[in-house]
Image: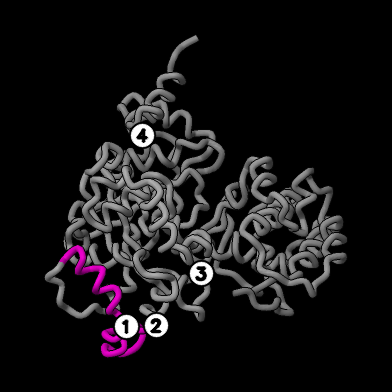
Amino acid sequence: MLREKEDSVSGKKDLTDAAINKTLQSLYAIADHWYVKHAIQAIIFNKLFLDGYVCCTEGLYPSNKETLKKALGTAKSPFSPIIERNAANFEELEMKCKHINASSKTKLSIFECQSIVYAILETGRELGCSLCVLMLLFHYFGKTRFKQNGDFLVAEEVDLIKIDTLQRFVGELDKVPENTNALFRGHSNINYSIQPSLFRLPRYYKNEYMMYQELVIRCPDAFMNCSSHLDFLVEMQHYGLPTRLLDFSFNPLIALYFSCENEANTGEVIIYTVKNSEIVYGKDEKAVIRSCFPMLSYKQQKELYSASNGTKSDLASCQGRLVDEIRMERPSFSRNITWQDIRTPIFVKPPRSNRRIAHQDGAFLLWGIDAAHYDDKVDDSYVGDQEKYRFFQNEKKSIYYIPQKRKKGILNALNRLGINKAYVYPEIDDVADYLKNTIED
């Protein structure tokens, strides 16, 4: 987490222009307020320290100001009024900070954090957003391993690769080794954090059991063909319920489509390289164990995580409820559950039970009970075991980013290959929407 600034802040000595120095001093005065620290940590630094890069000009907050205003609703963010209009300067923000009661410390919502970052970066455009964030790093830490690369801040171990055409992307695929499975995931916003939807908000993962049960009770017909817990999770994911599944595709063009389908931000494609032995099928014991986690309450999941940190006997004494659930699906299950079964995610090839999975050539990363969400002593910048699968070249993590202005051209090229909304989302309402938008005037 953030630590207090050091007396010597490297990088400031070259900023000799009086106007810039005055602006920076106002920025630093704002940055020292507790809620600003909290927001910058949550929205910028967690992503930066976890993945090694962040795009500073967009994606840290909703690009559409109306979206952020709606999301905030009645939340009392210190900077909510600034969302109504662009702030004039840092001095105005500093004056606002001075009038906020520091004794009223509460944990800010994600949207309140976004409103604060929005205000800081909108006002900081006179410096340049990436320079603004870089100066905040110097201010809080005294030094930093991150460097500016255009609109990005990037660590040395990250290789940013610009994808501006379909041909360029296909050419990059030749570099992926042939002796492993390549799994692809596309984000229309490059600052999207790589975690399942269940773990995006505490109220989701703390109520996983309730959401699972309520959806089955309220919509039983949707699950008539489900015969396993994984089947249930896949169907729930399909309908938008937060789950511990993270979607991947074996088809790189599908991932590229997802990275471009929303043109509001810079997109990205990430690649994981996975050995055959590390991908399991839906009926595999490893998949069955993890897909039963939603049948435990959050308290039971935390107890199971704590036991996985102890001895084998600790874990054996705590796994009874989970084993009972596993045996509902696999009556012959008899072995002891290990800490790896509890904590490590696995890649799963699910049955092609619906047309969307088939068209998207889908696979899932099935999350375990990890430290970031079940260990009170670990902060949310914890790097999970799944990061070992990221694709590296020359000891650098390869990040493929798609500029906002290039997305439309890439989508047009993908459409010529049959990769479009009607193919990716083959349900009748999505196909109808695609057809409406392709009719000429």
- The residue mark sitting in front, 2 or 1, is 1
Query: Label 2: how many residues lie within 10 Å, few (<14), some (14-19) or many (20+)?
Result: some
In the picture, the disc for residue 318 is 1
- Compare marks 1 and 4 and give the one earlier in the sequence: 1
Q: What whole-number distance in Å separates the C-alpha atoms at marks 1 and 4?
A: 42 Å
Q: Earlier in the sequence, mark 4 or mark 2?
A: 2
Q: Amino acid at mark 3?
A: Ser
Q: Which of the 4 quarters of the picture holds residue 1?
A: bottom right
Query: In the figure, 114 relative to 11: above or below?
Result: above
| Label 3 sits on residue | 381
Residue 208 place in picture, x, y as percent:
43, 62
Q: How is the image coloured?
A: one colour
Say which mark, if any, is on residue 306. 2
**Is label 2 in contact with label 1 (beta carbons under 8 Å)?**
yes
| Secondary structure type for disc 3 | loop
Q: Of circles 3 and 2, which is in front?
A: 2
Q: Is residue 189 left or right of residue 353?
A: right
Labels 3, 1: front one: 1
* Label of residue 425 in the image: 4
